[in-house]
Amino acid sequence: MAQFVNAKDDMVKEAIDGLLACSGGALARLDGYPHIKVVHRTDWDRSKVALISGGGSGHEPAHAGFVGPGMLTAAVCGEVFASPSVEAVLAGILAVTGDAGCLLIVKNYTGDRLNFGLAAERARSLGHQVEMVVVDDDVALPDLPQPRSGCCQTNSNSSLLGQ
């Protein structure tokens, strides 16, 4: 089977590069690229609550494809089918979060829950207001003996969601 891939090690980087090239300047990436793969809006007003999501790559243009007006503020991309690092998630939080705080939208995958959760704790220790919501992602798989459920669970007592 033929594939539309130049090199396996460059797949995620090239997918992000292509998305940025097509964005007309509306999207950018953080310094630290390609090790830290965070795509964010260039027009972001840090006085608003930032929405951040992300996870393992391999389904491009997800997650970065959801960054834009009325959608995500930033996406943190991991390697193919691997969660982004705590450092990458923290970099994304710090890049787009102002006084209003941020909401991390995390799929219910163990690595994402762990790394986004640890990054949220670190951001809070730096004085940022961060909430995290975990959403289901197995709706297409109704017969799993133990589906990964947990829609809309938060892990903080902050009032960010009430703003």
Image (tube, rainbow, N blue to C red):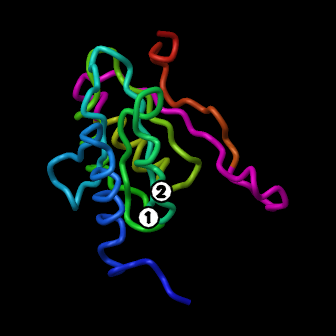
Q: Is residue 125 above or below residue 146?
A: above
Question: Could you say where residue 124 lies in the image, as x and y percent from the top left?
Answer: 31, 28
Give me the residue at 81% from left, 61% from top. 145
Disc 2 to disc 1, C-alpha distance: 8 Å
Kindly report which numbered mark, 2 or 1, lies closer to the viewer in this rendering. 1
Give me the residue at 24% from left, 43% from top. 28
Question: Could you say where residue 37 lies in the image, as x and y percent from the top left?
Answer: 28, 54
Badge 2 crowding class, 10 Å Cα cut-off, few under 14, some 14 to 19, many 20 or more, is some
Pick out the residue farthest to the right: 143
Pick out the residue farthest to the bottom: 1
What type is the residue that disc 1 sits on?
Ala
Give me the residue at 33% from left, 41% from top. 119
Looking at this view, is 81 or 127 the one in front? Answer: 81
Q: Which residue is mark 1?
A: 82
Q: Which residue is mark 2?
A: 111
Q: Quadrant of the N terminus?
A: bottom right
Q: Which residues are magenta?
A: 123-148
Q: Is residue 122 above or below residue 138?
A: above
Q: Is residue 8 above or below residue 42?
A: below
Give me the residue at 45% from left, 53% from top. 55
Confirm or deny contact between disc 2 and disc 1 (CB under 8 A).
Answer: yes
What type is the residue that disc 2 sits on?
Gly
* Secondary structure state at the residue bearing disc 1: loop
Question: Could you say where residue 100 lies in the image, as x and y percent from the top left?
Answer: 33, 15
The picture quadrant where one finds residue 104 is: top left
Q: Earlier in the sequence, mark 2 or mark 1?
A: 1
